[in-house]
Amino acid sequence: MNKDPRNIVFDWFSPTRILFGPGSIEALHDIGRAIGKLPLLVTGKNMVKQTGLLARIQKLWDGPMETFHSIEPDPCDEQVMAGVRTFEAGNCDWLLAVGGGSVIDAAKAMALVLAHGERPLEYTGQEISLQPLPVVAVPTTAGTGSEVTRYAVISDSKQSRKVTIKNRLGCPAAALVDPALTLDLPPYVTWCTGVDAFIHCFEALVSRESAPLVDSLALRAIGQVIHNLPLVDAEPKNLQARVELHEAALVGGLVINTVRTGIIHTMANHLGARYHLAHGHSLGVLASVCTRFNAPTCGEALRKVLQAAGVESADPSEGMDSVWSSLLSGHQLDRFTVSAPPAEETLRDLTELVSRDRRLFEVNPRCLELSDITQLYREVFRANSVGQAVR
């Protein structure tokens, strides 16, 4: 995919202050005091209590703190509103998000609603530029990059769909990225989040919006994921490998602020919402089939990915099949089981949800029709279904 040099224009926007490295969480008190006096700690139902991190955070903050620990994976709009009510009842003035992408996304949605009213779903469907309340993000997984992005993905509590708040001013005020917090992650979570980081960078490289600065960062991050995921699988306490993975995840978040995610992410969001798959798992299910579809128009970009991944292949599409297999098959992230292929009505519903993201059709490297999306979903279900078609 060759570009006219006159058309290489990009908008790099990264307002988040980033403190990166083992032990960076120790800066919580100073960072927080510069922002406000009374934080709402937003976290998942079990993670912080189980790991002892809650007590550590309270000690580091050394002051009053309200807590909202009701966030579940793929948080819905009702969970966001419950957090808003807790914040208001406690007279808090900033949000501290400690957890994975779901927790940080929920906190960013709360911060927007608290500053401007309405409900979170009211802010989806178009890009906005609204200043939220300040959020300090402490990621405990290495993949989503939500600690530095302007996006917040939430679920619609009344429908099986995910929606994205795209707020130009929605990045967290600060991110304390401490790879030591990921040392106890289960292997499945480590791999799902690592795949997310990889695909953020992969989709940035093949996008029509790709740019040299983005490419150089993304290619380095791709190599980091490929080489360090197997290391942490064999040695979960390998801190240096965890550092490399978290750096790649951070880069993945930074690049998708400039080059938006593509067909794999968009289709995976709706597949995952309907079938309750972890985000990285739903990405893995779609990665190979979407790559083969786009391969005829992005061979040059794929060759760069293969070089970064250390894979030699005369055919970029076949080479990427090898990359996806090595990245996904060990934890079976390239497959999921449904009892039967879905009815055509379900395929149409999924396609319609994807079609609402009009910018996808602008950034995908290959010209994309609605019928292509339907066929890609059909191929995925054909490979993962047993039995007769169902609704």
Image (cartoon, rainbow, N blue to C red):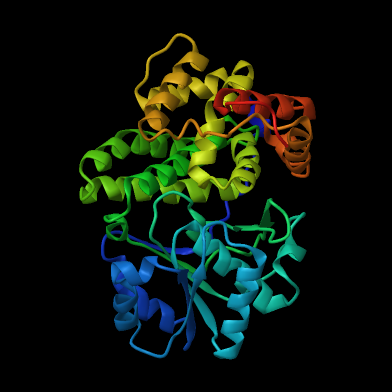
Q: Position of residue 213 (x, y in %)?
A: 51, 40
Task: Count the marks.
Answer: 0
Q: In which quarter of the image is residue 125?
A: bottom right
- Residue at x-position 51% and y-position 57%: 146
Q: Can residue 214 be seen in this view?
A: no
**156 relative position to 213: left or right:** right
| Nearer to me, 13 or 150 | 150
From the image, which quarter does the C terminus lie in?
top right
**108 relative position to 64: left or right:** right
From the image, which quarter does the N terminus lie in?
top right
- Residue at x-position 38% and y-position 42%: 191
Q: Is residue 139 visible?
A: yes
Q: Quadrant of residue 375?
A: top right
| Nearer to me, 102 or 170 | 102
- Residue at x-position 62% and y-position 67%: 109
Q: Where is residue 317 in the image (x, y as percent from the top left)?
A: 52, 16
- Residue at x-position 45% and y-position 69%: 45
